[in-house]
């Protein structure tokens, strides 16, 4: 793929998801990544998660809500950390498998082990596009990425995937004729209607080349019955104080959202602590200290080529509690864009 120029900023439009040029407050004590005229009232998932994993790009309202949530449901801290660690591991594995393009949708604020940070040591030329609905998160991302010529952030809504994949900045940055890893990290849970969520995934898959990968993380009901009520109370609180209510899904419900043109890779749909690309016996989550599995489901699926057998796209799924090692690095080489 030839070197793509840095995307030019876009102008405002009536499209609520249209990309906007960075705007700064020229004489203000506010950080430069707050768009002019923005009033911080509600907490939003991007900044709450940033705070949850130790980031600094958040406001008092985000911190206060997360503190209330974790008081109600302390296991939320475990889930946030497990989610972040899985995304770092799977990004390293994808890079080792030869994936050089990443589209991270619902990415929030890219710091503290974000996709571009994780892949840089393995592949300095890897390209990453971050997408988020929250305009402040996008401005924050651009501020963090201002010196990185191979990573960019745009505004977009997973409910409108065509706007994302045909966005000028996305198309100038990524070559959809070659495999792309699409990361949907804890974003599908904010699409509460199953049909809408499945439609969004299928629309994304339609734009991808064979051999592309779909990475999903999703909140699940706590495995501990005694904790389920606390978890549901915490999610109710979250929905009351953010503009984005969330839904918990089971492994079967999550599997039903994945486009049938994709094949789940081993170990299938499991909790975040069960997915590993390290050698057998590598205890990457020692900090769990015998706690119940984190309430985060994860899955990696590959878009089949025309030569691959159709089969059952969920055949690779394994029940929670049994998690064989994932495919070895390099084993995705057969899924190149030329396969189709």
Image (cartoon, grey):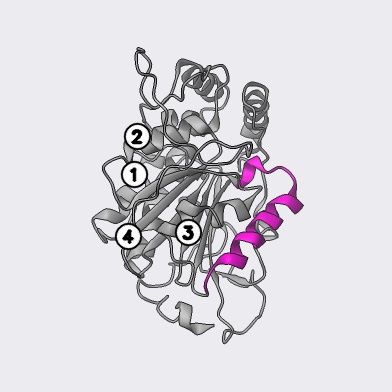
Look at the numbered disc 4 and give the secondary structure of its residue: loop
Quarter of the image containing the C terminus? Answer: bottom right
Q: Is residue 233 left or right of residue 4?
A: right
Q: CA distance from mark 2 to mark 1?
A: 16 Å
Q: Mark 4 or 2 closer to N-term?
A: 4
Q: Closest to the observer: 87 or 144? A: 144
User: On the picture, is 180 further left or further right than 92?
Assistant: right
Q: Which residue is mark 1?
A: 113
Q: Which residue is mark 2?
A: 143
Disc 1 secondary structure class: loop
The residue that mark 4 highlights is 126
Report the residue marked by disc 3: 171
**Crowd tier of the residue under label 1, counting other residues whose Cα lies within 10 Å: few below 14, some 14–19, many 20 or above:** some
From the top left corner, tell me how far across and down residue 59 is, in percent.
45, 19
For the stretch drawn in magenta, what is the main secondary structure? helix
Alpha-carbon span between mark 3 and mark 1: 25 Å
Which marked residue is nearer to the observer: mark 4 or mark 3? Answer: 3
Mark 2 or mark 1: name the one nearer the start of the chain.
Answer: 1
Identify the residue shown where x is 41% and y is 33%: 22
> How far is mark 2 from mark 3, CA to CA?
21 Å
Given residues 241 and 253, the one toward you in this image is 241
Mark toward the viewer: 3 or 1: 3
Q: In the picture, residue 288 is in which quadrant?
A: top left
Task: Determine if residue 335 is in view.
Answer: no
Determine the CA span between mark 4 and mark 3.
15 Å
**Helix, strand or loop for disc 2:** helix
Q: Earlier in the sequence, mark 4 or mark 3?
A: 4
């Amino acid at each position: 793929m030839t070197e793509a120029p840095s995307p030019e900023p876009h102008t405002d439009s009536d499209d609520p998801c249209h990309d906007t040029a960075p705007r700064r407050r020229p004489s203000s004590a506010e950080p430069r990544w707050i768009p002019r005229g923005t009033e911080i009232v509600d907490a939003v998932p991007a900044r709450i998660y940033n705070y949850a994993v130790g980031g600094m790009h958040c406001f008092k309202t985000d911190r206060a809500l997360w503190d209330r949530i974790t008081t109600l449901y302390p296991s939320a801290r475990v889930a946030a950390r497990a989610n972040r660690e899985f995304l770092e591991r799977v990004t390293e594995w994808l890079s080792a498998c030869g994936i050089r393009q990443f589209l991270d949708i619902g990415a929030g604020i890219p710091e503290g082990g974000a996709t571009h940070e994780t892949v840089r040591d393995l592949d300095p030329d890897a390209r990453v596009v971050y997408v988020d609905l929250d305009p402040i998160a996008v401005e924050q991302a651009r501020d963090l990425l201002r010196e990185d010529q191979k990573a960019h952030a745009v505004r977009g809504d997973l409910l409108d995937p065509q706007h994302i994949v045909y966005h000028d900045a996305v198309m100038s940055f990524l070559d959809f004729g070659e495999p792309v890893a699409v990361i949907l990290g804890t974003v599908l849970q904010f699409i509460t209607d199953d049909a809408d969520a499945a439609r969004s995934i299928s629309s994304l898959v339609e734009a991808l080349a064979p051999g592309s990968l779909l990475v999903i993380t999703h909140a699940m009901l706590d495995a501990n019955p005694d904790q389920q009520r606390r978890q549901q109370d915490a999610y109710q609180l979250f929905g009351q104080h953010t503009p984005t209510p969330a839904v918990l899904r089971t492994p079967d419900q999550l599997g039903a959202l994945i486009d049938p043109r994709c094949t789940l890779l081993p170990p299938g749909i499991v909790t975040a602590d069960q997915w590993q690309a390290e050698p057998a016996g590598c205890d990457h989550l020692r900090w769990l200290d015998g706690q119940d599995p984190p309430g985060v489901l994860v899955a990696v699926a590959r878009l089949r080529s025309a030569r691959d057998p159709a089969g059952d796209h969920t055949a690779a799924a394994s029940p929670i509690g049994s998690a064989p090692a994932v495919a070895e690095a390099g084993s995705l080489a057969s899924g190149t864009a030329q396969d189709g």
